[in-house]
Amino acid sequence: MIEARKQRDDALALAVQPQGTPVTEGTDEFALINRLAALLDPPTHGIGIGDDAATWSPTPGTVTVATTDMLVEGIHFRLDWTTPEDLGWKAMAVNLSDIAAMGARPRHALVSIALKPDQAGIVIEIYKGIAAHARASGTFVVGGDTVRTDGPLTINVTLLGEADPALILRRDGARPGDVLAITGTAGGSAAGLALLSGEPTDSDPDRSRRLLAMHHRPSPRLHAGPALASLGARCGIDISDGIASETGHLARSSNVAIVIDVDAVPFHPDAVAMFGLERARTLGLNGGEDYELLVTLPLSLVDRARDAIASETTLTMIGRVVQDQHGGLVTATSGGLPFTLGAGGYVAF
Ligand code: ADP
Ligand code: MG
């Protein structure tokens, strides 16, 4: 650890030129990188921030699992709705959730940012949130890129994790006879977003605070993903776009028909209390950003799976994979009658 920190500090000291004589244009960029790096823990092994590239040693027998997500101001976040620190937490969360949804464990991250010259202060606050979530998840930020833009503030996180190659949760792993199950609750984050958008509701400060926290500080299921995979689940996805759309992805990739029992879905109790059951259902089924896991697994594994993840969250059966179905099909029932799922999910373009 000390060795790694020294390597990094030496490299950064060279970059910022301690005599204060800029050798090239762009010394401000190096000074900012230096300040960002100081907020982050250096990796325990390998080369981190400060060299041309980072190095690490994969755990023998594992495969590397890689994902990347970009957040653009005005499209994915608004600086008048979120604190910069929460934004940094969330930029990590969306990527950590994808790693968990593969049944993998996070290890290293690269973070790239494009900012206007007057946004250095905001970026430092964003990095406090990134550093907090990196530390909480055992992830080391080992590099990135910092560029100037005249456009919107943009943050890209690339996350690298690892998994046992035989224990990956894939979208195409659902089999007829499996049950469909969800971790945690649905609709809390979308209810928080509805509050921010000014959707009318009874004001209740405690409930509002909890729903806004669901939206701003999601908790990706870092333990549940690998735990469900090692118990024998083979199919999973994280819920970034609502249950209806994510179940659709599983059904299409696996070529199966899935029936959702809407009455069984654990909609967030504060969302139900503040917006009513019908609206809470829409928020959970067609909203998004809960970052829970949606998995299919044999019924015989459900009790053990529930126990295995109980320290982190709950597991609730919400449907069944009923048959093979070319191209996939998702239907839903409530009170024994067909239930129309509505158009779901976030539309990027
Ligand atoms: P190069 O010109 O070789 O790409 P940079 O000046 O871009 O080097 O980066 C110097 C070091 O700082 C590298 O280790 C890079 O990975 C790291 N770095 C740059 N920007 C960031 C950032 N926003 N977050 C984390 N590390 C960064
Ligand atoms: Mg660079």
Image (spheres, rainbow, N blue to C red):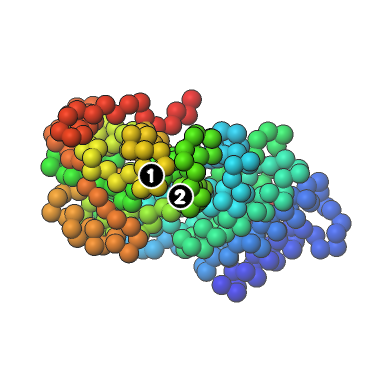
Quick one: SS at disc 1? helix
Q: Amino acid at mark 2?
A: Arg
| Res. 51 visible in picture | no
- Which label number is shown at residue 41? none
Does label 1 point to a residue whose CB lies under 8 Å from ligand 1?
A: no
Residue shown at 65% from the left, 54% from the top: 125
Q: Amino acid at mark 1?
A: Ala
Count of all numbered marks drawn on residues in the image: 2
Q: Which residue is mark 1?
A: 273
Residue shown at 81% from the left, 63% from the top: 18
Q: Are marks 1 and 2 in contact (CB under 8 Å)?
A: yes
Position of 177 compared to 199: left or right? left
Residue shown at 48% from the left, 53% from the top: 206
Does label 2 point to a residue whose CB lies under 8 Å from ligand 1?
A: no
How far across and down, in percent of the image, does residue 329 sit?
A: 22, 28
Q: Nearer the viewer, residue 282 or 50?
A: 282
Q: Nearer the viewer, residue 199 or 329?
A: 199
Q: Which residue is mark 2?
A: 207
For residue 105, above or below residue 249: below
Quadrant showing the N terminus:
bottom right
Position of 99 compared to 135: left or right? left
Find residue 223 and report its image quarter: bottom left
How far across and down, in percent of the image, does residue 202 sit?
A: 46, 41
Label 1 crowd bin: few (<14), some (14–19), many (20+), radius 10 Å:
some
Disc on the earlier residue, 1 or 2: 2
How far across and down, in percent of the image, does residue 112 sit?
A: 60, 46
For residue 199, above or below residue 17: above
How far across and down, in percent of the image, does residue 127 sit?
A: 62, 54
| Res. 176 visible in picture | yes
Quick one: SS at disc 2? helix
